[in-house]
Amino acid sequence: MRLRYPAVLIAVLAALGAVNAPGAETIQEFLGRHWRRPLVPQGPPPARFSQLEASLQPEACGACHPVQLADWTTSLHARSMGPGLVGQLVEMLESDPGSALGCLTCHAPLAEQAPGVADGARARANPVYDGTLGPRGLVCAGCHVRGHERFGPPRRDGSLASTVPRETLPHNGVTRTPAFLSSEFCQSCHQFAPDGFALNGKLLENTYAEWKASRFAREGVQCQDCHMPDRRHLWRGIHDPAMVRLGLTIVARAGASRYRAGDTISVTLSVENTRVGHAFPTYVTPRVVLSAELVDQAGEVVAGSREERVIARDVALDLSRERADTRLLPGAKAVLEYRRRVDRAGLRARVSVVVYPDAFYTVQPERVLSLRLLIADFLPTHCPWPQEFTRDKSNPERSSDRSA
Ligand code: HEC
Ligand code: HEC
Ligand code: HEC
Ligand code: HEC
Ligand code: HEC
């Protein structure tokens, strides 16, 4: 992937060490205020605001910012109140409302999105609750609006100040801060606090710390540079095959191009985390399976020939324990060495890398199949095997085959 190293990044680096223009506030101070939990209600809008400017609905913002709305609608931030979370919340709001409201501070953070206000372990009614905004998840205003004031990044040329009086602009213009360009902005939700929920001594959500320890942090590559290229609001991740491909280098090698019956075939499949800015994958829900197997002329897998290697943080469904952690930190590599005697002619070795982004929730095999994101089809670009590289179209995994 082409990372945005130039001007903007240099501006961020300069800004991170320095102070932030308005009121000489540092980025950390700004973010501490911007992401205080829970957020306070917006209060009444300025008298000169139209209804459109006063609205917190994403579609209202989209009337003037259609590009961001179109992007956001396709993102997981727009679905952060999905069935998985809502299912848990319904029960929790009854049994443990304090914790349930805590979930919302990341999944639907505006005060106007919370059905209740935490009062110790209990909850009381929230007078500003907007039942049409709650289910919309992480809306524009969740990141951009506090007290009806708009906050956003510096202009693309790095400038912060408004060129015209702000009260002449829609929503009284924008308070611009380099905090929007830093990983710390995302840290607010993508990192549990040191005393947060952990398994086997490791926080359940540790993305920021993984990034901070990586070469990407040292090189000044922020979350936004990979997840919001050109300021797009797509936030692609493990659910997007193209994004996953960009982060990995996958190489498959055969010992020889052809084997005879009686030979021992040798194939090496490796997956290296070259451009994921944190562990691959960072969360407990995905599961990645490397596999190699022999396939006969009819396309059937030779019984007993399949070998697998799993990349995942494997935790029990009730989150009581961690069974294994084979995730790849930046720079790390998983290798599957496949050696097997071929007892007859006409067999081929097939290797594949399959990503199940939501494996944690999908126990039914049929569902797993429908969620498969197939990344084996990009082997040719990295693969040293020259001609004869075929894809098995009959197989839903579109795995890459090689004559044996
Ligand atoms: C009536 C039109 C209108 C509506 C509605 C509107 N905006 Fe804006 N917005 C603008 C204009 C015009 C600017 C450019 C202001 C400037 O040049 O400083 C702007 C600037 C911004 C910026 C800074 C953009 C940049 O260029 O860096 C952000 C962030 C922003 N708006 C967020 C929002 C959000 C979030 C909402 C909804 C809660 C919203 N706006 C609703 C017209 C609108
Ligand atoms: C500190 C912020 C934060 C808090 C608090 C939080 N979450 Fe999350 N949650 C996230 C983030 C970020 C992700 C996405 C993680 C990833 O993919 O790396 C997520 C993912 C999830 C998912 C999986 C995604 C899906 O839609 O299936 C579920 C379910 C979930 N959270 C439930 C909860 C529940 C229940 C609570 C409260 C007990 C909670 N979360 C509290 C930040 C938070
Ligand atoms: C998860 C937080 C988040 C959400 C949700 C979000 N934004 Fe942003 N937005 C950002 C960040 C961070 C930037 C700066 C990104 C960068 O410069 O790399 C930004 C930049 C912008 C800009 C400036 C774009 C430019 O080209 O200069 C506008 C306008 C904007 N957002 C509007 C919106 C609107 C409208 C929505 C909802 C449809 C929205 N945002 C949702 C975090 C968010
Ligand atoms: C207010 C909390 C919050 C903030 C701030 C936030 N996120 Fe998220 N993000 C979430 C939650 C919650 C999810 C999980 C949504 C789901 O799957 O239900 C999520 C999901 C994602 C995903 C989805 C990946 C996938 O395919 O599973 C990416 C990528 C992401 N966020 C990147 C970012 C980046 C980059 C920033 C900073 C610009 C950011 N987020 C800021 C709460 C937040
Ligand atoms: C060098 C580029 C790069 C940087 C920097 C980066 N990411 Fe990612 N991220 C990726 C790629 C590629 C994927 C897809 C592979 C994967 O899921 O691990 C991804 C996936 C994700 C996911 C999907 C969930 C999962 O289990 O992997 C989330 C959430 C996420 N990133 C958040 C962040 C946050 C927050 C930051 C900053 C602290 C960040 N990323 C920094 C490249 C990057």
Image (cartoon, rainbow, N blue to C red):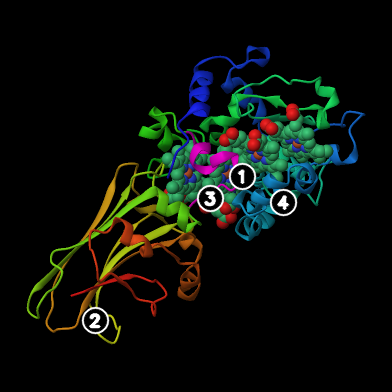
Q: Residue furthest top?
A: 24
Give the mark, 4 or 2, whose residue is nearer the N terminus: 4
Please name the residue shown 56% across and 39% down the image.
230
- Measured in 3D between alpha carbons, the distance from the residue under mark 1 to the one under mark 4, in whole angstroms, is 16 Å
Look at mark 2 in the image and give the residue it sits on: 302
The answer to whether 164 is drawn above or below residue 330 in the figure is above
Could you say whether the residue bearing mark 3 is in a helix, strand or loop? loop
Could you say whether the residue bearing mark 1 is in a helix, strand or loop? loop
- Measured in 3D between alpha carbons, the distance from the residue under mark 2 to the one under mark 3, in whole angstroms, is 37 Å
Q: Which mark is residue 136?
A: 4
Give the residue type that dot 2 points to.
Val
Give the mark, 2 or 3, whose residue is nearer the N terminus: 3
Look at mark 3 in the image and give the residue it sits on: 236
- Measured in 3D between alpha carbons, the distance from the residue under mark 3 to the one under mark 1, in whole angstroms, is 9 Å
Give the residue type that dot 1 points to.
His
Q: Is residue 156 visible?
A: yes
Please state the horizontal and vertical placement of residue 297, each as a whole percent of the image: 25, 85
The answer to whether 289 is drawn above or below residue 114 in the figure is below
Q: Nearer the viewer, residue 263 or 169?
A: 169
Give the residue type that dot 4 points to.
Arg
Q: Is residue 51 left or right of residue 400?
A: right
Q: Nearer the viewer, residue 111 or 102?
A: 111
Give the mark, 1 or 4, whose residue is nearer the N terminus: 4
Q: Which residues are magenta?
A: 222-237
Give the mark, 1 or 2, whose residue is nearer the N terminus: 1
Give the mark, 3 or 4, whose residue is nearer the N terminus: 4
Give the residue type that dot 3 points to.
Arg
Q: Residue furthest front?
A: 387
Look at mark 1 in the image and give the residue it sits on: 233
Could you say whether the residue bearing mark 4 is in a helix, strand or loop? helix
Please state the horizontal and vertical placement of residue 177, each as a whole percent of the image: 63, 24
